[in-house]
């Protein structure tokens, strides 16, 4: 097999890349499709000036593409949702450069899924080894390799060549065959059921409605408003938004059946939005924004609308994004997520490994604690 490094996902044909996605068994996962990665690059959300330099790895044989991984040479650690700023500081204290590092991930998307696309296990192992070559001494000056939110098979492949596993916890909602939203509420403790009804009633009595919007129904003015609402979420924290306007437009054009907008309106006036994507039996809540801070608007737009959509459309799971213990009170459950890290600097590898062992125990205890607090402490998740 021959190896190629791509500085743009457009260097490989979309049908060829997506064909490998399907062969690898991940055709329903939207974030690794060619169209999604291409929208990130074409819009300028990644690439020059962003600190995310595409360096995708592909393996080919005489019959074509056999393995591929989305990868980026990073000049910082923003937009990853696996926080390693302390590691970068430790490198500096040792007189070493942590950046650039190599990240095998989906930019700005803390959603678990495939990272190593491969026709079989041997090709997966060879692809992991090809990624490892980028951080060997004298090889392209990357300090380390980080696979973020990978699925179990891909994490095992990186662990087999020395990757250190890191555990985290997210909160997701699972559909237990609810007939409707009221049936879901009926499964919650009385106190939480009353809280949710009170939150929703307050907005409903004020005349606020949340509707599902398909990209084809959005006009130019609404597109501009949606981006302004999204960007405000970052600007009130003094940050620039990660994603550019063209990303959302291009994704709506190339993946329209998987793009979902929840828009909250008061009369004809939009107030809040949530950008979501659908993949297989899962709804992914990705980004949110509003132009006016209204109590309960975030929960209604980002959580309750998503839950209602999953019940109505028979989806099994709602992944509403990273972090957020407040989701426990709204019927979400704690789920372990993992990343894998190849640290080649011997002076720091052992220190990071020791830290990750302690952190793993802490995160395991934290997840157990959150499980006891959730509405289904003894049931386990349907996905387990």
Image (cartoon, grey):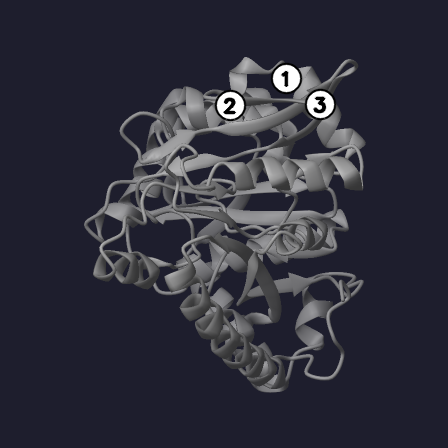
Quick check: 153 left or right of 320? Answer: right
What crowding class fits label 1: few (fewer than 14 Cα within 10 Å), some (14-19), or many (20 or more)? some
Q: Find disc 1 in the rendering and name its residue.
A: 14
**Residue at 55% over, 38% down:** 131
Q: How far is the residue under mark 3 from the one under mark 1?
A: 21 Å
- The residue tagged 2 is 38
Q: How far across and down, in percent of the image, does residue 118 sit? A: 73, 34
Nearest to the observer: residue 24 or residue 216:
24
Residue 28 shows up from this direction? no
Q: Quadrant of the C terminus?
A: bottom right
Vertical arrangement, residue 249 with respect to residue 182, above or below: above
Residue 1 is marked as: 3
In this view, 331 is above or below 273: below
Marks 2 and 1 close (CB-CB < 8 Å): yes
- Gap between marks 2 and 3, in whole Å? 25 Å
Single out the mark in the foreground, 2 or 3: 3
Mark nearer the N terminus (2 vs 3): 3
**Depth check: 94 or 86 in front?**
94
């Amino acid at each position: 097999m021959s190896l190629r490094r791509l500085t743009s996902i457009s260097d490989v044909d979309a049908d060829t890349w997506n064909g490998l996605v399907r062969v690898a068994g991940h055709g329903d996962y939207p974030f690794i499709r060619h169209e999604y990665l291409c929208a990130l690059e074409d819009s300028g959300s990644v690439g020059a000036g962003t600190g995310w330099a595409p360096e995708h790895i592909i393996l080919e044989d005489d019959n074509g593409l056999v393995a591929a991984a989305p990868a980026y040479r990073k000049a910082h650690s923003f937009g990853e949702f696996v926080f390693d700023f302390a590691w970068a500081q430790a490198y500096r204290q040792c007189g070493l450069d942590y950046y650039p590092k190599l990240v095998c991930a989906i930019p700005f998307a803390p959603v678990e899924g495939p990272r190593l696309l491969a026709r079989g296990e041997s090709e997966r192992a060879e692809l992991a080894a090809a990624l490892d070559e980028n951080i060997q001494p004298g090889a392209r000056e990357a300090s380390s390799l980080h696979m973020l939110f990978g699925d179990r098979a891909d994490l095992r492949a990186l662990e087999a060549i020395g990757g250190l596993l890191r555990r985290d916890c997210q909160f997701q909602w699972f559909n237990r065959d609810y007939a409707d939203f009221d049936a879901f509420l009926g499964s919650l403790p009385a106190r939480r059921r009353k809280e949710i009804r009170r939150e929703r009633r307050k907005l409903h009595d004020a005349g606020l409605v949340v509707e599902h919007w398909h990209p084809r129904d959005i006009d130019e003015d609404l597109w501009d408003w949606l981006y302004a609402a999204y960007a405000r979420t970052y600007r009130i924290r003094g940050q620039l938004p990660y994603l550019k306007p063209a990303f959302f437009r291009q994704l709506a054009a190339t993946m329209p059946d998987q793009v979902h907008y929840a828009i909250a309106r008061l009369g004809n006036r939009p107030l809040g939005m949530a950008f979501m994507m659908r993949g297989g039996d899962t709804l992914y809540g990705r980004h949110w924004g509003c132009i006016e801070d209204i109590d309960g608007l975030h929960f209604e737009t980002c959580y309750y609308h998503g839950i209602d959509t999953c019940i109505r459309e028979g989806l099994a799971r709602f992944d509403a994004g990273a972090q957020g213990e407040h989701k426990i009170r709204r019927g979400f459950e704690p789920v372990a997520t993992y990343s894998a890290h190849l640290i080649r600097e011997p002076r720091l590898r052992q220190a990071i490994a020791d830290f990750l062992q302690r952190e793993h125990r802490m995160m395991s205890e934290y997840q157990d604690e959150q499980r006891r607090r959730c509405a289904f402490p003894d049931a386990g998740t349907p996905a387990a």
